Image (cartoon, rainbow, N blue to C red):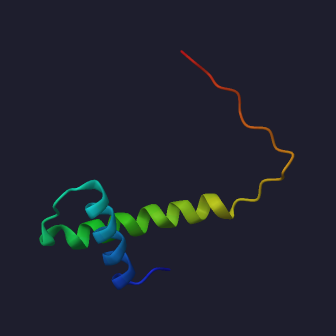
Amino acid sequence: MIDETQFDSLIDAGTALLGITVDPAWGPAIRLHLGISLAHAATVLDFPISDETDPAPVYRA
């Protein structure tokens, strides 16, 4: 898992890239949500999918 310093580096890089200002008081909440998002991504990436698996069809309403 990523440590707090790495989270801060990701947040700083992302906000600079997007050109937004983040109140330092939001830091803990941003780190929490970033950690949750990365954990969800790890779950998806860990799911085994064979190379022969076809993507699902596109459904439109």
User: How many numbered marks are there?
Assistant: 0
Residue 23: horizontal and vertical position, in percent? Answer: 12, 66
Residue 17 vertical position relative to residue 12 in the rendered view, above or below: above
Residue occupying the point 31% across, 59% down: 17
Residue 40: horizontal and vertical position, in percent? Answer: 52, 60
Q: Is 45 on the left or on the right of 39, as rendered?
A: right
Residue 28 vertical position relative to residue 47 in the rendered view, above or below: below
Q: Quadrant of residue 43?
A: bottom right
> Which residue sits furthest top?
61
**38 and 11: which is toward the camera:** 11
> Which residue sits furthest right?
52
Residue 9: horizontal and vertical position, in percent? Answer: 34, 76
Q: Quadrant of residue 59?
A: top right
Residue occupying the point 24% across, 73% down: 28
Residue occupying the point 76% across, 59% down: 48
Residue occupying the point 65% across, 25% down: 58
